[in-house]
Image (spheres, rainbow, N blue to C red):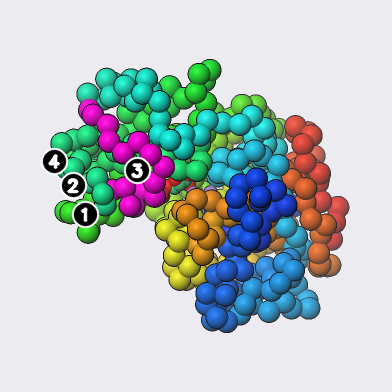
Amino acid sequence: MAKYKRIFGIVMDSVGTGSAPDADQFDNVGADTLGHIGEFYKGELHLPALQKLGISNLREQEILGVPKIEIQQGYYSKMQEISVGKDSMDGHWEMMELPVKQPLNHFPNGFPEDLLQKISEFSGRKIVGNRPESGTKIIQELGEHQMATGDLIIYTSGDSVLQIAAHEDVIPVKELYRICEYARSLVNGPEYVMGRVIARPYVGPDKDHFTRTANRHDFSLSPTGPTVLDHLQKSGLHTVGVGKINDIFSGQGIAEGYHNESNMDGMDHVDHVMQEDFTGFCFVNLVDFDAMYGHRRNPEGYGQALMELDQRLGQVVANMRDDDLLMITADHGNDPCYKGSDHTREYVPLLAYSPSMQGSGQLPTRQTFADFGATILDNFGVAGNGVGTSFLSDLQ
Ligand SMILES: O=P(O)(O)O[C@H]1O[C@H](CO)[C@@H](O)[C@H]1O
Ligand SMILES: [Mn+2]
Ligand SMILES: [Mn+2]
């Protein structure tokens, strides 16, 4: 019989905990999402629920305002990434035992002409932008032009992403999705292989009032092999995806899915799923940390969002059943105090708690995010891709 009947895995998107040993290869030495937010708050960052779970204990240096404590609930550690990229897809796929080993295409100098021409012909629209840029900056710069001309705003970042920004009144969301689906078909290989095509709709009257909407949609590369989610589903276990999870795995291996309007909406979905009776795995992504604060280099907003989540986590912990396991982690870093506007190559936290645990303490640092998925498979006695190492027997 499974040790835990229900496993809840919550990914705090981009909440890294210090630069990874290979950060130099990404020009990210010194990045530390949690550490720098703590410093920014000068001791006023309060995360009591995460603190009890060991969020500071897992670090060499505690988060300012969140002292290390002696008795933790459950087990804590940190995980290192082996995927070649530092995007959400890399992180989540690796957690599900499918690390991304093949480098994907990046376009730091803009997309090739042939690709853009095809998108232009398909959509009947001209293309502007075509460079790596922050999504909020580029709509401020080109949004009014788009309103006047109907041109598509296409841009990228340090990740393997092709993003299309479109004002909802000028290019309806449905049309934008169709264009993105077409663009997706162009970057599935063999010539170009990209992680994600992302629809970026926004609204607003003018450049000082544009806001992006929750109609964002990610069109990911389909998983290139079976994932932990597939293995679980094939073995008759229930799988739930909350937030971006469904997009990241192209729906593969997910039986029940929820779209999040925000982090708090995501936590409402968690509360809802916690009331359901099932045997299996609920995989949750909370993207606001990344999209609203990390890429925007906004440490104040980031800290606020962490404190809001912390309150909700306190309730989750209180509502857990004895045979529930909660694991909290992240998919990459995005230090809001770092240069640029891209993700940062960092360790991610790993917190594991069940009310049935008798012990607590530190687990060895995980050499790959895949240990997360390997532990879930081990719990249900299901064979996987053999990539990670289960820490199930350490949870006592
Ligand atoms: O600046 P915005 O549009 O939020 O884009 C960011 O979001 C993408 C996906 O996380 C990243 O690759 C980065 O480009
Ligand atoms: Mn992410
Ligand atoms: Mn991101």
Name which of mark 3 and mark 1 comes first in the sequence. Answer: 3
Tell which of 92 and 206 is nearer to you: 206
Circle number at residue 299: none
Q: Quadrant of residue 265?
A: bottom left
Q: Residue furthest bottom?
A: 43
- 373 or 387, nearer to the observer: 387
Residue 94's quadrant in the figure? Answer: top right
Packing grade of label 1 (10 A; few <14, some 14-19, many >=20) is some
Can you name the residue that lies furthest to the left here?
Answer: 148
Image quadrant in which the N terminus is located? top right
Q: Residue 200 bears which disc, if any? A: 3
Q: Write down the region rendered in magenta.
A: 125-139
Three-letter code, disc 2: Glu
User: Could one spot residue 228 in this view of the protein?
Assistant: no
Q: Residue at x 32, y 28 (%)?
A: 179
Whole-Å distance between the Cαs marked 2 and 3? 15 Å
Check disc 2 and report its element: helix, strand or loop.
helix
Label 1 belongs to which residue?
207
Q: Is mark 3 within 8 Å of ligand 1?
A: yes
Badge 3 element: strand
Image-based side of 126 in relation to 130, left or right? left
Q: Residues within 10 Å of mark 4 (few under 14, many from 20)?
A: few
Name the residue tied to disc 2: 144
